Amino acid sequence: MFESKAGIFFIAGIGFFGFAFLSNAVVPILMYKDLPEQTAEEVVNPNILYQFKELSRRYPDSFEAAIGEPTKENCAQALRLGRQVYIGEGCWHCHSQFVRPVSNDSKRFGAVSETWEYQNELQRPVMFGTRRVGPDLSREGGRHGSDWHTVHFFRPKTVSPDSPMPEYPWLFDGAPDQPNRRGLALITYMQWLGSWHSTYPYYEELDALAYE
Amino acid sequence: MSSATTNEILPRHADLVEERLVRWYFYAALAYLAISMTGGILMALQLIHWNPLNGIEWLSAGRWRMIHTNAVAYGFIANAFLGVLHWSVPRLTLQRVLSQKLSYFIFIAWQAVVLCTAAGIIFGPTLQAQDWVASLTDQLHLPMGLGAQGVEWGETPFWIDPVALLGLALVAANFLTPIARSKGSMYVTLWYFMAAFIWTFLTYAMGNFLPEYSLTGTSAGAVGGLFIHDLVGLFVTPLGWGTMYYIVPIILEKPIWSQGLSLVGFWGLAFFYPLQGIHHFLYTPIPMFLQYGAIISTIAVEFVVATVIINFMGTLWGDGRKVVTNLPVRWFYTGMIFYFITCFQCALQVTLTFQKLIHFTDWVVGHAHLVMFGVFSMWIFGMMTYLFPILLNKPWYSRRLCEWHFWLSAAGVFIMFLDLGLAGVFQGYYWSSLQPWDVSVTGSQPFWITRMFAGLMIAGGFLCFLWNLLRTARGRSTDSPTAVSAPA
């Protein structure tokens, strides 16, 4: 069996792979089968809708041209596109989206992440991330105004001089106060992160951070 | 060369091996490695504020970070191993591959897959912003972007995935046929290769479809972790070790030290390796008992790795000097030492104690580079160093350049590994001590600058290799090809 073709094909090749899939994938799938996946429309909450409307007032011409009215449906569409930009530009390779229960993460970033927060269309595939060059973004929504985000995406060093983050001028029509469709969508997505949580908007425990 | 070509009853080498295809695969692999290194250097420059191309959409470091990893996995490593397979499988089985026409079709199809992946990653997000594309994707309710998918190592855009999967199925059919037709007992190498064909197909299907189409959140995270892990462990690792079991005894001209240990190594890897996926996402909302299971099987596999290393050291015993004189042997054994280091590191870093500190840091990046470059790329370079003189029927143009290639690669990747490991420890402490985020970024600068120079060393070694290869290919043929530094 151990050196036969059939043994290697069926036991090692298919059997062991299947066993691992069962224990590492099917078990969590079964555990969460009762938590239904929400659509982007369902996760549009008053917090993000407020930010979305604020965005439309702050950049009325750009918003009108790229998105139209700041309705709930358009907000869901913007969240979908924003997530696609987040993935396409590789944001998730330098920013994580889970707050760990260790390493003082919860002081810096807010409440420890839980499963229910990820049961929606916008976490398919899940954006846990594997590296933090920049900070975790699970609770990013509401921490900065949308004007900060536009300047930051246009040229990060303007507001964060030591940041090694790349510039994204193609999310704008030439100037930071003229975000295009992708830019507005990405900012909507940023403001959405954590907007579902009771701690929104979360700010660091500044006392703990005043180390000087 | 081998006895197969001299014995008249056995098929001739020329009838078995399509050497041109091996060469083509190697050339393609090297081209993608050059592209990948460009991406790596771009990202390294970005982190130290030296990127002169910052703000150019198609050269964005974020997108090229994904080119860097995808070009290595699917461009360099996959192509190089396909070349090695076209050499070794027919010679081991004494059977031709299923179809030589299919082989050439796969070659072209696979290059198309890799190039489309790169094009998708670079141009996809741009294309998506066009009004007509946007309205079309809205009408189709397309849940994904045209660019990268959000699974690490599985960024292959969704519209390429079915083609890539079909390609993997064809590869499996092409090589499993000669293995199935071969007579007698199977050599260790073929166990690994056979399993690799099945595992790679299943792994690719799992990682590129489930988290995109049917799974959300935590379950998708579990599958994503399994995918990252299996891609290295069930695609690259078995091909790598299968190659080592094949080539080391040939060059050292003696059998592998212990057949029994080979069995332990293979079955231990096959059982324990796939069980570890979740260790990539420790401290996530994935249930704790699953995390513990992944940790225990990770520690278990280190014992298996030790048996494999012992087996190869036992094989080398008595021929230690060949590590100095014979370049391929040196590449292989250096890679094995690095393999042992990374696996030993795994057993430590997978514990929750270590994870608290090093998760999300550059420690992991250093680890990944030692595995992908320090081990598997080194083995591939060893194979190329051994095979190119045979394939081109010419000796290496310059032994000295071969030496430069080795030393720059080995030193570069080891410096990078130490440097990023140390950077990870610093970053971990900066974060947990709740200093402002910027402190962890500015504090990383010395390490990132060192890393860039380590990367340039690796790239320099690679350029030596390319130059050497070019001069070799243009040089005069010899009647009796010899591998580098064949024993006098």
Image (cartoon, coloured by chain):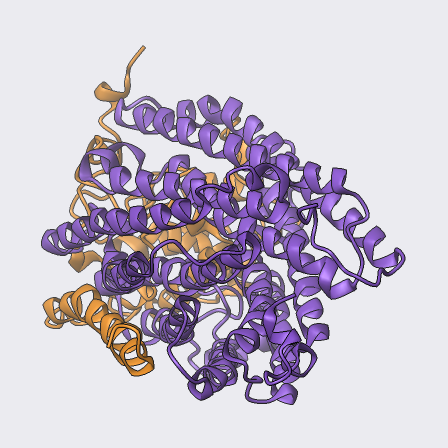
* Apparent colour of chain B: purple
Q: Nearer the viewer, residue B109 or B157?
A: B109
Q: How many marks?
A: 0
Residue A175 x, y percent position in the rendering: 63, 45
Residue B34 x, y percent position in the rendering: 68, 52
Which quadrant holds the C terminus of chain A? Answer: top left
What residue do we see at 62% from left, 64% from top? Answer: B123
Can residue A19 be seen?
Answer: yes
Looking at the image, residue B20 lies above or below residue B449: below
Q: Quadrant of residue B26?
A: bottom right
Looking at the image, residue B195 lies above or below residue B315: below
Q: Give left or right: position of B412 versus B364.
A: right
What residue do we see at 54% from left, 84% from top? Answer: B95
Q: Give left or right: position of A10 versus B48.
A: left
Residue A125 x, y percent position in the rendering: 34, 64
Looking at the image, residue B120 lies above or below residue B133: above
Q: Nearer the viewer, residue A155 or B95?
A: B95
Q: Give left or right: position of B266 versus B218.
A: right
* Apparent colour of chain A: orange
Question: Outermost residue, top direction?
Answer: A212
Residue A31 x, y percent position in the rendering: 10, 67
Q: Nearer the viewer, residue B188 or B203?
A: B188
Q: Quadrant of residue A24?
A: bottom left
What residue do we see at 56% from left, 56% from top? Answer: B72
Looking at the image, residue B443 lies above or below residue B379: above
Can residue B62 be seen?
Answer: no
Which quadrant holds the N terminus of chain A? Answer: bottom left
